[in-house]
Amino acid sequence: MYERAMGQNFSRLATVVQRFHRLAGLHVLHGQVEADAPRSLSGKLLALFLGTPRQAFSGAIRFELDASPMAETWTRYFPGRTMTSRLHICSGKVVEHLGAARLTFDLVESAGRLEMRLMRLRFLGIPCPNWLMPQLA
């Protein structure tokens, strides 16, 4: 799916990133994650509604990927919280459905890394103004 969205730029990604985004079927992965807490009241409310972590933490994560050529389901098992989202391609962008939100990303290769740049966010079908958009790194 990511290869279709990025076209020739996909081949510029690091080999390990290409390999991950070419996985098909169900895979369970384990790793470490570090997350900052939302700082603003609007960020805290958005985290509450999306089911994303609301407190800063660092620790183990279990990640389940169910990938097909047309869509992917990502389930992240954070300490004390599970977050599931579904992703597909629409007009060359990756669209992630996360709870009541729809996030649209532009995929960009930068020095072999994959950058998912948040272009649009809709919550309950209502567009999020740019000044309120979360900053993702």
Image (tube, grey):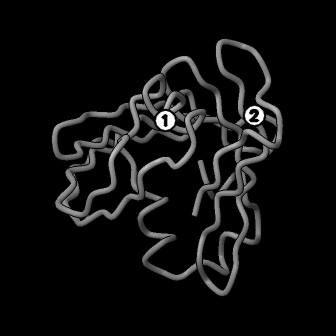
Q: Nearer the viewer, residue 76 or 51?
A: 51
Q: Amino acid at mark 1?
A: Lys
Q: Secondary structure at mark 1?
A: helix
Count of marks overlaid on the render: 2
Q: CA distance from mark 2 to mark 1?
A: 28 Å
Spot occupied by residue 88 in the image (x, y as percentages of width and height): 61, 34
Q: Nearer the viewer, residue 93 or 101?
A: 101
Q: Nearer the viewer, residue 123 or 106?
A: 123
Determine the residue positioned at 27% across, 49% down.
Answer: 63
Determine the residue positioned at 64% across, 66% down.
Answer: 115
Residue topped by disc 2: 90
Q: Amino acid at mark 2?
A: Cys
Contact between marks 2 and 1 (CB within 8 A): the answer is: no
Residue topped by disc 1: 44
Determine the residue positioned at 64% across, 54% down.
Answer: 135
Image position of 21 (left or right of 63): right
Point out the frontmost of discs 2 and 1.
Answer: 1
